[in-house]
Image (spheres, rainbow, N blue to C red):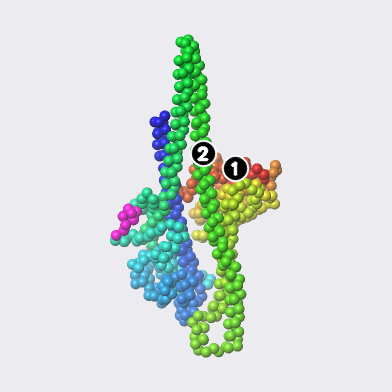
Amino acid sequence: MVGAIGMLYAITSTILLSSFAQVERQNTRRDVERTLDILRNELIDLADRTVEYSNWNNTYAFVQGENPDFLAVDIDKITFTALRLNFIAIADQSGQIIYNAGFDLSQGQEIPLPSELQNHLTPDALLLQHDSLGSNYAGLLVLPEGAVMIASHPILTNSSQSPIQGSLIFGRDLNIVKLTELAELNRLSIVVHPIDKPHLPPDFQMARTTLSDSQSTLVHPLNSDTIAGYTLLNDVYGNPALLLRVDMPRTIYHQGLLSLRYLGLSLLLVGGLSGVIIHRLLKKSVQYLTDRNHMEQALLQEAALRKSEEKYQEKAQELEQALRELKQAEAQLVQNEKMSSLGQLVAGVAHEINNPINFIYGNIRYLKEYTQDLLRLTQLYQKHYPKPVPEIQAEVETIDLQFLLKDLPRLMLSMQVGAKRIQQIVLSLRNFSRIDEADMKFVDVHEGINNALMLLQHRFHAENGYPSIQIHKEYSDLPLVECYAGELNQAFMNILTNAIDALEEGLEAAEQAKGEQGILQGNPLHPAYYSTEDTLILHPTSPIPEPVIRIRTEMLPNQRISIQIANNGPDIPKEIQQKLFDPFFTTKLVGKGTGLGLTICYQIVVEKHHGQLYCISAPRRGAEFVIQIPIEQ
């Protein structure tokens, strides 16, 4: 028995530690991807700002020599500060730099451009080579002073037409301050080194040697308490330039070790109990044999052995059942504790944010009133004293008073809208977590769906040239439903997240197929298609399909409700539909899915709420997940 327990423990520990290590690597790769996404968003924002200023009649006229006041009026300290820029360069049609300036955002003053940067702004440099109206460059440059993010766009008119008259270059420093902001945003430790640095740390040297184009991310433990993910960052020319490292504590690995200790104690307890039972049974059998004569002893021995065997089997079955229930209870306890801690964390963060944002939002109204009073007073001064003294006149020109009078109300409105937006997000977080509703209660399921949509709203916006995801709500008049609100919200979140992932994969496939064939397999949900017999043909005005998520609720007989979440992405083959709710089954790439989302949804809907959860999918019809639960449990 000791040998069997030891072998069981060894096998189980190997499997569990391997699983925890795999989850740890997946989480590390996910954090590296989150960091890369933030860097990409910074580059996209910088490129968008460059396009706004390059497709502008004022810039177009300045390059042609027809707007001498452009630098004084349109390119000033406010421009650098508002756009968070560290340098600006403008080149004419021949590639000659006609304006360049650097800016120290921390000191608020102009500084000269780095000398090494000017080597990238020569007439034959890539950043000044724009051979089409849609040409655009955005990426990283590694200079002796540090890394910078840079974007270049041809100078055109407001209508993005006319001959190209030059190039506009915007840049931002990627220094320690920016990296610190990224680290605080991710709640991680981020380190960056140039790959051509003479003396790289040993772990960076190992990562530089290991990483290649086929392996974009490398995960390697630094020690027993920290694991790190490494990836290469290419510069604007497409060459490897920076080596990024993201550190995170090995919490999952240590939790695995703790779980193994609990498992070992459980096995010892069960083994000891089994030994005591077997000992007592054998002792009783031996005592039974000594009290009978030889004939009776033979007969009783056979009966006792049979009886003992039956009892032993029963006890063994009971112990096996108890062991299964113990493992299941332990796993459920750990999962409940994690969900409870996560809910408390979300609710706590929402509460801490809610107080200061209410203070800010409440005072914006008074600030607007005070600002309007000051603006009216300024206008009265201008009306009754049109010719101020020279010192006041000089200050008016310095601060650009007319611009301030126009921009200040818009700035106040923007602050009010932003504060209101934060209030809505905080309210959605608090409603979604339902930390104060751990028991089963009657709730409005529409509110839970809307909260999940609010938290996922950032993924509905248009990105990378793809259209934004449209949400079609078809809500029926439903009564309050008795359920575990927080867990049901988690099911909505998992299904909606899978729908968004499917639509993104469909858009990427449509983009690759565009131009290769004119007839695409579509979906009746799709507003950008029209039907022609058995095929759906792409409308000429919609080069990329418009992604749609439709949410429908309805009342069913027998006091049940139905929630249907459909998308017009790729369909799900029948052989995959049969495995959708199996644990750890996923069709996503490594690092993008754990295979537990739909399994958890099934446990929540079917096992905890005695409902039904199934998928409907057919060729050219996307996918639809149906949730049916009773109104009262």
Provide the residue span drawn in magenta. Answer: 199-207
Quadrant in which the C terminus is drawn: top right
- Image x and y of residue 474, in percent: 66, 53
Instruction: Give the spatial CA distance, label 1 vs label 2.
Output: 15 Å
Where residue 410 is drawn, which disc sits there? none
538 or 203, which lies in front?
A: 203
- The secondary structure that dominates the magenta segment is helix
Amino acid type, label 1 = Lys
Where residue 608 is drawn, which disc sits there? 1
544 or 595, which lies in front?
A: 595
* SS for dot 2: helix
Measuring 41% from the left and 36% from the top, which residue is drawn there? 9
Amino acid type, label 2 = Gln
> Which residue is at the far left?
198
Image: 25 above or below 242 = above
Image: 157 above or below 227 = below
The residue indicated by pointer 2 is 328
Measuring 61% from the left and 55% from the top, which residue is drawn there? 450
Quadrant in which the N terminus is drawn: top left
Question: Is residue 205 covered in magenta?
Answer: yes
- Image x and y of residue 5, in percent: 42, 33
